């Protein structure tokens, strides 16, 4: 049986509060960025997770090494405190989000190119049609 873990990091990225969802499943990390706007309360974050977690669009998965180790509860508490005080997101999450952004950019560029080519082709056909009408001998 494979272990699936998720983590939500909420931080202030001027001028909005942002949440980063990280999901690790089968040694693959994928991330999703959510902009909350004003500072979210605990119950608002909890409601968001319950209602909209299944609608989140996660980035493509990146391989990550997951360590399974028993931890001292006090050490876990110190690490949680350090994560809360540490502003920013993990580098793996940044990579996953950057990959998602690049894919979206490439997809948008491709669709724009197709629309431009179709427009150029239409203009060319109209020009050709106009030329033929001029040379019909009227």
Image: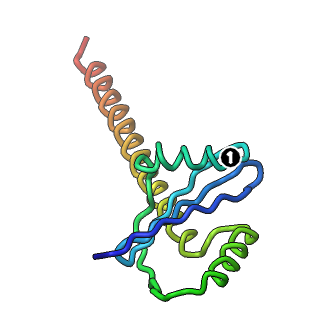
> For this rendering, which residue is in front, 81 or 121?
81
> Which x, y percent locates residue 33?
56, 56
> For this rendering, which residue is in front, 27 or 69?
69
Query: Is 132 situated left or right of 69 in this image?
Result: left
Q: How is the image coloured?
A: rainbow
> Which x, y percent locates residue 59?
45, 61
Q: Dot 1 lies on which element? A: loop
Classify 16 as above or below 28. Answer: above
Which residue position is annotated with label 1?
40
Residue shown at 67%/76% (left/top)? 77
Classify 134 as above or below 121. Answer: above
> For this rendering, which residue is in front, 5 or 112?
5
Residue shown at 61%/56% (left/top)? 19
Going by the picture, which residue comes out furthest to the top? Answer: 138
> Which x, y percent locates residue 21?
53, 60
Q: Name the quarter where the C terminus is drawn.
A: top left
Going by the picture, which residue comes out furthest to the left? Answer: 136
> Which x, y percent locates residue 85?
76, 70
**Quadrant hosting residue 90:** bottom right
Instruction: Classify mark 1: residues with Cα within 10 Å, few (<14), some (14-19) or many (20+).
Output: some
**Quadrant hosting residue 60:** bottom left
Q: Name the quarter where the N terminus is drawn.
A: bottom left
Query: Is 25 situated left or right of 136 in this image?
Result: right
Classify 104 as above or below 121. Answer: below
Residue shown at 45%/86% (left/top)? 68
Count of labels shown? 1
Residue shown at 54%/45% (left/top)? 48
Query: Is 61 situated left or right of 9 in this image?
Result: left
């Amino acid at each position: 049986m494979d272990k699936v873990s998720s983590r939500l990091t909420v931080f202030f990225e001027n001028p909005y509060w942002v949440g980063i969802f990280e999901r690790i499943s089968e040694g693959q990390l994928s991330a999703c960025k959510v902009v909350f706007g004003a500072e979210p309360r605990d119950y608002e974050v909890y409601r968001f997770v319950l209602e909209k977690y299944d609608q989140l669009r996660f980035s493509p998965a990146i391989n990550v090494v997951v360590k399974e180790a028993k931890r001292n509860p006090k050490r876990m508490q110190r690490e949680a405190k350090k994560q809360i005080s540490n502003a920013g997101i993990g580098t793996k999450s940044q990579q996953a989000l950057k990959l998602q952004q690049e894919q979206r950019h490439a997809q948008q560029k491709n669709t724009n190119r197709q629309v431009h080519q179709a427009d150029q082709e239409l203009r060319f056909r109209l020009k050709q049609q106009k030329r033929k009408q001029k040379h019909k001998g009227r």
